[in-house]
Image: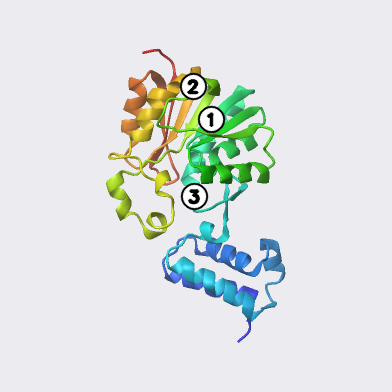
Amino acid sequence: MAITYNDLYLDIRRQLRESGVEAATMEARELVCFGTGKSREELIRDSRLYASPEREGQVRQLVERRMAGEPVAYLIGEWEFYGLPLDISRDVLIPRSDTEVLAGQAIAYIQALGECRVLDLCAGSGCIGLAIASQAPSARVVLGEIDDSALKICRQNIRRNGLSSRVMPVQMDALEKPARSLGEFQCIVSNPPYIPTADIAGLGKSVRAYEPRLALDGGTDGLDFYRSIIQNWREALVPGGRLYFEVGAGQADAVLRLMRSQGFGDIQIVKDHHKIPRVVLGMLCAEI
C-alpha cells in the first residue's frame, strides 16, 4: 500500500517513540531523509507525494537497524556539532550536545585572545577543534589524534567545512610527552577517553557495541588520560595558557585536584545542560 513521505515519517517517529528513543522526531527525520535521498527541505516540499516501494523499503531497513541499537549518526554517516556538518564513522565517537559546553567555554576564551594556537587533543572527529576554528577566525588549530582512521575523518571534516587554511590534523599520542617540534599553544582542549575499563561492559548497547573502545576506555579509574595530559602536556602550554577538559559524571573533583597538583590555578568546574559537572578548566600559572 502506497504511503506519502509525511505518513512514512510519522510512522517512523511513532515506532521510535514507542521503543523509547528520546530524540524520535529528529531521528525519524534524518532516517527518512537519508533513506529517500532527500534533503530536509525536499522532504517538506514533497511531504504529500507518495514514496516508491523501493525508497520506503530503504527507510524501513534503516529503522530495523536503529531498533537493534545502531546509532543514527553511524547509519547516515554524518552528524551536526555546533552548527557544523561532520562526517562520522564507527572509528570516532558521535559528538554529543554535552560536548558543546566544552566547546563553548573554550571558544569564549579563544575569541578574546585574537591570534593564537589551539590544540584539540584526542580529537576524534575533530568536532571541538573545528567548532573553535569556525568561531574564532584568528585561531590556528591542531587536531591531535592517535588513530589513523579517526585522522582520516578529521581530514574529511576539515575540507567539508572549508577550514584547511587554519586547521591541521597531526598524529599524536596523548599518553606520551609531546614532541618539542609541536611548539606551544595558548589553549589545549580535550575530551579524552574517560570510562573506567570495568564499566564499559555495562554501557548501553548503542555505545558498547558500536562506538570505538579506543575512544571510551580511560583505564582502571577512568583518569589515565587526565593524568598524562595534565603532567606531560603542560609543557606544550605557554605560561598563562589554559587547559580545558570534558569529564565524566563524578570525575570533576578528581581532575581538579590533578590539575592543582601540577601547577594549574584559577580552576573552574562548569555544569552541562543536565546540571552535571562536565567541564574542568584551569590556567598554567606556576612551575613545579
Q: Nearer the viewer, residue 275 or 158?
A: 158
Q: Quadrant of residue 229?
A: top left
Residue 71 vertical position relative to residue 200 in the rendered view, above or below = below
Q: Amino acid at mark 1?
A: Leu
Calculate the distance from the C-alpha at mark 2 to the C-alpha at mark 3. 27 Å
Q: Secondary structure at mark 2?
A: helix
Q: Residue at x 67, y 67 (%)?
A: 43
Q: Amino acid at mark 3?
A: Asp
Nearest to N terminus: mark 3 or mark 1? 3
Q: Which of labels 3 and 1 is toward the front?
A: 3
Mark 2 residue crowding within 10 angstroms, few (<14) / some (14–19) / many (20+): many
Task: From the top left corner, tell me how far across and down residue 212 is, in percent.
Answer: 43, 50
Q: Residue at x 53, y 53 (%)?
A: 89
Quarter of the figure that contains the C terminus: top left
Q: Secondary structure at mark 3?
A: loop
- Dot 3 corresponds to which residue? 91
Question: Residue 236 got which mark?
Answer: 2
Task: From the top left corner, tell me how far across and down residue 49 is, in percent.
Answer: 70, 77
Q: Secondary structure at mark 1?
A: strand
Pointers 3 and 1 in contact (CB under 8 A)? no
Mark 1 residue crowding within 10 angstroms, few (<14) / some (14–19) / many (20+): many
Pointers 2 and 1 in contact (CB under 8 A)? yes
